[in-house]
Image (tube, rainbow, N blue to C red):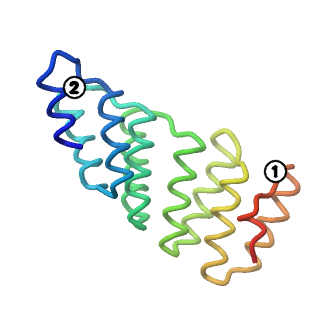
Amino acid sequence: ALRMLSVIAQSEVELDAFAFCAVMRVCEKSSEWRIAVQLLCVMAHVAVESNRQVFNSAISACAKDSSWQKPLHLLSVMAECMVESDRSLLNAVISACEKSGEWERALQIFCELAHNIVGVGSISFSAAISACEKVAQWEKAVQLFRMMAQCNVKSTQTSQTP
């Protein structure tokens, strides 16, 4: 991934957010979250403005590492960079929390998504329900499932899995 970026930098192609995002997606697929995060620093160093897609790729790469702190930290960096979060970004962070057993943090982010962003969808509900399930918080999971019906969000197979 870094070799690819180096080749791009040495060519006459301008390094932009799109190029960095493409390399970060390769990092995500190959579980190289550290490189994805380093690329965010490189972007700042070479004065390439970051955007939502770049952060989404970096957060997704970190989320695959089953660590909730890194994706959550990147959300705060995003805010500092004046980049707005969206449903897919927060879903990735909710999933990272769920994988780490941080159900309370997952629910906190879920509530932020429900109130401040563009609403929640089946992926958001599924990740939050799964976070509750992993730590035997069945009352919260049932509450979320009922809320899902009240919000007219179609349930997925994941959200229905016992």
The residue located at (15%, 26%) in the rendering is: 9
Circle 2: is it few (<14), some (14-19), or many (20+) Cα within 10 Å? few
* Position of residue 19 in the picture relative to residue 159 (left or right): left
Quadrant of the rendered image containing residue 147: bottom right
In the drawing, what numbered circle is on residue 47? 2
Taking depth in this image into account, of 10 and 124 the one nearest to the observer is: 10
The residue located at (75%, 72%) in the rendering is: 161
The residue located at (74%, 65%) in the rendering is: 159
* Residue 63: % across, % down: 43, 59
Q: Secondary structure at mark 1?
A: loop
* Position of residue 64 in the picture relative to residue 46 (left or right): right
Q: Quadrant of the N terminus?
A: top left
Taking depth in this image into account, of 139 and 59 the one nearest to the observer is: 59
User: Farthest residue in the top direction?
Assistant: 12
**Disc 2 residue type (three-letter):** Ala
User: Farthest residue in the bottom direction?
Assistant: 136
Circle 1: is it few (<14), some (14-19), or many (20+) Cα within 10 Å? some
The residue located at (33%, 28%) in the rendering is: 17
Mark nearer the N terminus (1 vs 2): 2
In the drawing, what numbered circle is on residue 153? 1
**Disc 1 residue type (three-letter):** Val
Report the mark closest to the observer, 1 or 2. Answer: 1
Alpha-carbon span between mark 1 and mark 2: 41 Å
* Residue 95: % across, % down: 54, 61
Image position of 12 with respect to 101: above or below: above
* Position of residue 131 in the picture relative to residue 99 (left or right): right
Quadrant of the rendered image containing residue 160: bottom right
Taking depth in this image into account, of 90 and 161 the one nearest to the observer is: 161
* Residue 70: % across, % down: 36, 58
* Position of residue 140 in the picture relative to residue 61 (left or right): right
